[in-house]
Image: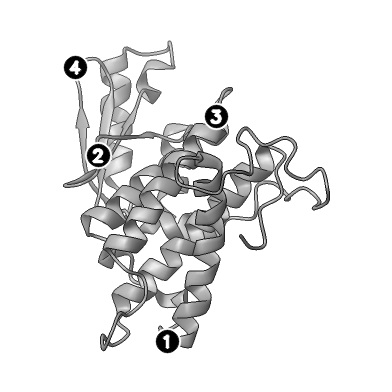
Amino acid sequence: MIMEALRGVLGAPPVPQGSWEREARFVSTAALRGAAEPAAEAAERLAVRLRAVPGVRHVDVRPNGFLVIGIAAPGEIVHDILAAPLAVSPPETGPEAGSAAPWPDFPRTWDNPGFAVRYAYVRAGAVQRWARDLGVPAGGAARPELLDGPFDRAVLRVLAELPSRRDSRDPGWAAYLERLAEVYHTAVERASPIPRGDEAPAEVHTARVRMGEAVRRVLGEGLAELGVAPPGKI
């Protein structure tokens, strides 16, 4: 689990940097937190430990003590999310289930970010059902390195913010869910997780369906944090 390994070395989750279109990178200020040694020395010491973490491609130490960490397979983040226990339990459904939402339930159009978030949650579940019906193999052995296209990486980039947002005093769940829903909808349209036409099921479909499971897990967690019951259907 790459994110837990990085946290174990740094003491806190690093924050994703850049777009991840070409390289998946994190930045950490862990070396600046201690007063026992100069930041530059602390950064070099941490860099040595980080380079020994499986899945870390490189670690750069900046003059200000910041650490920039490149990882080889950003798709590993999907496994991290799905392997961890649920962070929060969804609220009970009922007539007041949507009253705490930061967005209205209607109109159910793309102009309403609340619709986009709720639909992304439902859509990710539907993709799992469609994938089973079309013979896409189950995702237990999905290969994370296959999530390497620009639309896959865009989703992974937003998913990678989850650990640091959980630790933040102001996680900004509503805006975060809106961004995650946006990149997920784009990925489904532009890098389909299910075969189209005469296309045969492939390993990349398995990896993308599993990524959708992670998206659904995170959207459900964020909605629960906002006091909103995730929808069963739309």
Q: Position of residue 202 (x, y in %)?
A: 30, 82
State yes or no: discs 4 and 2 in contact (Cβ < 8 Å): no
What is the x, y in percent for residue 184? 40, 54
Q: Nearer the viewer, mark 1 or mark 4?
A: 1
Which residue in the protein does label 3 denote?
171
Q: Amino acid at mark 1?
A: Leu
Q: Which mark is residue 86?
A: none
Q: Position of residue 64 (x, y in %)?
A: 24, 15
> Label 1, on which residue?
134
Look at label 2 and name its amino acid: Ser
Query: In front: mark 3 or mark 1?
Result: 1
Q: Quadrant of the C terminus?
A: bottom right
Question: What SS does tag 3 mark?
Answer: loop
Q: Residues within 10 Å of mark 4 (few under 14, many from 20)?
A: few
Residue for badge 4: 63
Q: CA distance from mark 3 to mark 2?
A: 20 Å
Q: CA distance from mark 4 to mark 2?
A: 23 Å
Tell me if I can see residue 55 in this picture: no
| Residue shown at the point (56%, 61%) measured from the top left | 122
Q: Gap between marks 2 and 1, in whole Å? A: 32 Å
Q: Does residue 23 show up?
A: yes
Residue at position x 60%, y 35% in the image = 103
**Between marks 1 and 4, how big is the CA–CA gap?**
52 Å
Give the residue displayed 31% in from the left and 15% down from the top: 39
